[in-house]
Image (cartoon, helix red, strand yellow):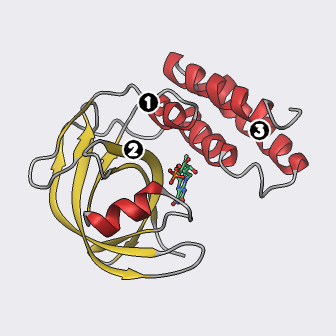
Amino acid sequence: MPFILETIIATRNADGSFHVRPYGLHRDGDEWIFLPFRPSPAIDNLARHPFLVASHPSDVRVLAGFLTGRSEWPLVPAETVDGVRLADTSGHMEMEVVGVEQDDVRPRFRCRVVHEVAHRAVTGFNRAQAAVLEAAILSTRLDRLPPDKIKDEIAYLKIAIDKCAGPQELEAWGWIIEKIGASVAL
Ligand SMILES: Cc1cc2nc3c(=O)[nH]c(=O)nc-3n(C[C@H](O)[C@H](O)[C@H](O)COP(=O)(O)O)c2cc1C
């Protein structure tokens, strides 16, 4: 299995606005593979404008927010491509698509980093942030996973929330639990 970096990806919409959502980037040597599931605006956007920007937030509310209709996170222009990054990010990568492997389910966009910036020191690991990340991913797979599995995983992840969460993680957790709870009895 490849190393997967969970990040926030921005692609340019036809009207010049930006589509921004969390996705994993698969590392392949010096390149990264972006694998959006169909259908996704990101797929159409990259066909028109083959550039994307990946931002690495340290606030997990950004991840949870984009999945729960809270997308008011400030964006600023990228430095070398026509794109945007999160204003509040520990680092970002500006990338060009250099190859596409088409697939009916999940096309593979091979991306080359054209510009990379570290904006501030990375603070290290936190279990509650990891728990929010896992719960956020679960919340996007509710139609593919059995309800019991979701319930069990949330109960386990909550241990880290109870022990290690700060205010941001608690808020993000609440948004994700509300989203999951609308479909699954937790
Ligand atoms: C940490 C994280 C990683 C994700 N990785 C992917 C991914 O690699 N591909 C994908 O299609 N969706 C991924 N998702 C789910 C998408 O963010 C979610 O389905 C979103 O609504 C997709 O928007 P779209 O349908 O506009 O592409 C991920 C979600 C999270 C929280």
Q: Where is mark 3, residue-wise?
A: 154
Q: Are marks 1 and 2 in contact (CB under 8 Å)?
A: yes
Q: Residue at x 55, y 72 (%)?
A: 106
User: What amino acid type should be assigned to the residue bearing mark 1?
Assistant: Ser
User: What amino acid type should be assigned to the residue bearing mark 3?
Assistant: Ile
Q: Residue furthest front?
A: 15
Q: Is residue 5 left or right of residue 160?
A: left
Q: Quadrant of residue 177?
A: top right
Q: CA distance from mark 3 to mark 1?
A: 24 Å
User: What amino acid type should be assigned to the residue bearing mark 2?
Assistant: Val
Q: Where is mark 1, residue-wise?
A: 71
Residue 115 % position (x, y): 14, 58
Q: Determine the secondary structure under disc 2.
A: strand
Q: Is residue 12 left or right of residue 170?
A: left
Residue 21 % position (x, y): 45, 45
Q: Quadrant of the C terminus?
A: top right
Report the mark closest to the observer, 2 or 3. Answer: 2
Residue 119 % position (x, y): 18, 39
Q: In the rendered structure, which disc, 2 or 3, sits on the residue that comes first in sequence?
A: 2
Q: Residue at x 31, y 46 (%)?
A: 55
Residue 176 % position (x, y): 65, 31
Q: Residues within 10 Å of mark 3 (few under 14, many from 20)?
A: some
Q: Residue furthest left?
A: 80
Q: Which label is found at residue 20?
A: 2
Q: Quadrant of residue 76?
A: top left
Q: Determine the secondary structure under disc 1.
A: loop
Which residue is more in the foreground, 47 or 3? 47
Q: CA distance from mark 1 to mark 2?
A: 8 Å
Q: Residue at x 37, y 80 (%)?
A: 100
Q: Residue at x 47, y 58 (%)?
A: 24
